[in-house]
Image: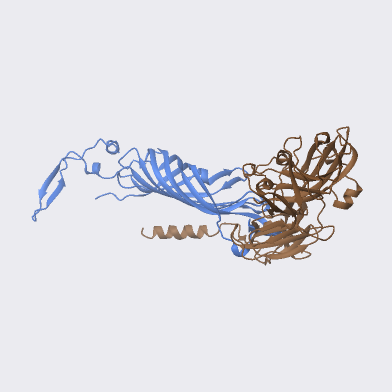
Amino acid sequence: MKRIPFILWAFLLSLSACIRPELHIPGQDIVVEEPILEAELDVVVDMETDWSVDWQYDWDATDDAIWGGIGYDEPKGYQVRRYFTGKEPDAPHTDVEAFAITETKFSRHFEFGYYDILFWSDIDSPDGTQVLVINEGLETVTATTTGTRGMVRSFSKMAGVRSAEDEPGVIGLKNQPEIFYAAYPENIYISHNLEDYDYDPARDVYSAKIETQMRPLVYIYLIQIVLQNNDGIIKGINGNAAMSGMASGTCLNTGHTNDEPSTVYFNIRLKHNRLFNDEPCDIIGGKFTTFGLCDMEPQTRAGSQYNGSREDLNNYLFFDLIFSNDGVTTFSVDVTDQLQSQSHGGVVTVVIDCDKLQTPETPVTNAGSLFVPSVEDYEEVYWELEL
Amino acid sequence: MSLLIPILNGAAQTPVDTVYHSPNGLPITRFSVPETQPVAAVLPPASARLLALKTNLLHDFLVVPRYGFAPGINLQLEYYPQKGHYSGNVGFTFSHNQRKKDFKFFQARELQLELRRYFKGNAAFVGPYVGVFGQGILYGLALDKTQGWIGEGGGGGLSAGWVWALDKKGHLKLEVSLSLGVLYSRYDPFVYGNPITETEDGLYYYDYMGNAQDFQRRNHQFFWFGPTNAGIQISYALFGRKKRP
């Protein structure tokens, strides 16, 4: 009787050892080398502004020759920074591999683990003088621009801070950045799981694809200053224009602009005998590019309203007008509302009734007497070139 | 047998004990048995059995959805103590069905231990009962090329049932039962053919696409709470007890 439990146990054990079917582990004879990741870059520009309708400056071949096209061009090459963060996602970057590609696809071996990859497009400066400055760090890469001439102006007014006041001085202006695009896919997991890859028997490699959308980090504003009733009152312009309160840089990883306002210098051109809303006028036009407003999120949809924390910064459009007696006056117009309502680029329109402008009594080259126009929000400043 | 019936019904009473003292002073309890009462009245019935051999017909003739008829062998032994309400039951199910042509398997080994309490006392072991049980199971199931599971599990819970005697001596019995409880299992899904190379080489593989060096068996699990077993059982009593002298 005492043996019964042992007999039962042995009996059950023997019966239990033969559960079928016999199973095998797949892939035991497969050695997984470092897989290949094929990245596909797609440049996405979502602009809903109909420039041909909203912008009546009538961009012509001469403008094109001076400033290039008014739209976003397809990049011709890309910079890639690959960060391997090991076995943990969101780990700090300890090393970076930098390389450039000329197509929207590239293949490369990857170790198993997590990767962050930063892409940005090469700068295509027409004259080869790139003003965009890329500042590379292990964790973030930022972009700024070089400086250009200066402007005598109260800093607080230049920055557009309504409540502040200080003494005028020479303030440096920034060049407008070249258009470029960036994308930053993070925590790309290179797994040991063969299910994540396609096997290419011809190359005997396992490969996977990532699709990345690159978005512009520089936005385009088209300026039109409509001179109504300009019967010779405004003789011409010297081409100087600037926009204040713009971010001086942006982060390529996040697309978020910094909180350091700057004034961006750009050029304008005058065309006579145009129509604006079917009425005859002269139109001053120009294009300027910018990282955007301060503390601003990257573009998610065109024409989006500004949601940053620096609504207190005003954006002034500065421009020179040359009067019939050769007097030069610099005007500033508050266009904050227009920029904040089109925070990722658009058309900025200023209408001036020249009948209400007063010709400077004492014309001085490159400077203008203080002048208070009849149009509200106009302020007068004068420019001083930085040598 | 006429004396047995009142005993099983609890009608017979033990006479008042008489206490004596041994020479060393320790009390000795002896039963005083009236001359008119037969000795057999306080002993287990002459027909009482030690064990019952049982089988669960639902396990023996199981029909599984999407598989069909999956016969098995279920054997149980129920131990009947000499008296009281409680019995112990051990059962084992052996099912070893496979239809290789259809890529179907239904294989199971189940061991169940149960402690029962019958509502009727005096070692009657018929009528309603409740019990507690624990079980362990090994299984290998496949319904087609792509749906297979192999694993082990265990659990426990409460059981209830009813036992009827089918003959006058109570050797042959019919029983219905239901078990409720928990069952926890760790398992691996498996498929026919190599899932990585997608080739059917006549072998079954774990449904795993990762690195073979990282493979760990029984990497899946499930937990079930609810009915865990049912039975329609036939039992036959074995091994009659020795009669007391």
Residue A225 location in percent, x, y?
Answer: 81, 40
Residue A196 location in percent, x, y?
Answer: 68, 56
Answer with the quarter of the image where residue A96 lies.
bottom right
How is the structure coloured here?
by chain
The residue positioned 58% from the left and 47% from the top of the image is B70
Residue B115 location in percent, x, y?
Answer: 38, 46
Q: Residue B98 vs residue B77: left or right?
A: right
Answer with the quarter of the image where residue A206 lies.
bottom right
Camera-nearest residue between A230 and B57: A230
| Residue A139 in the image: above or below residue A69 | below
- Can you tell which chain is drawn brown? A
Residue A162 location in percent, x, y?
Answer: 64, 42
Camera-nearest residue between A175 and A96: A175
Q: What is the drawing colour of chain B?
A: blue
Q: Residue A237 vs residue A161: left or right?
A: right
| Residue A153 in the image: above or below residue A50 | below
Q: Is any part of residue A354 visible from this angle? A: yes
Answer with the quarter of the image where residue A24 lies.
bottom right
Q: Is any part of residue B195 visible from this angle? A: no
- How many numbered discs sit on the rendered protein? 0
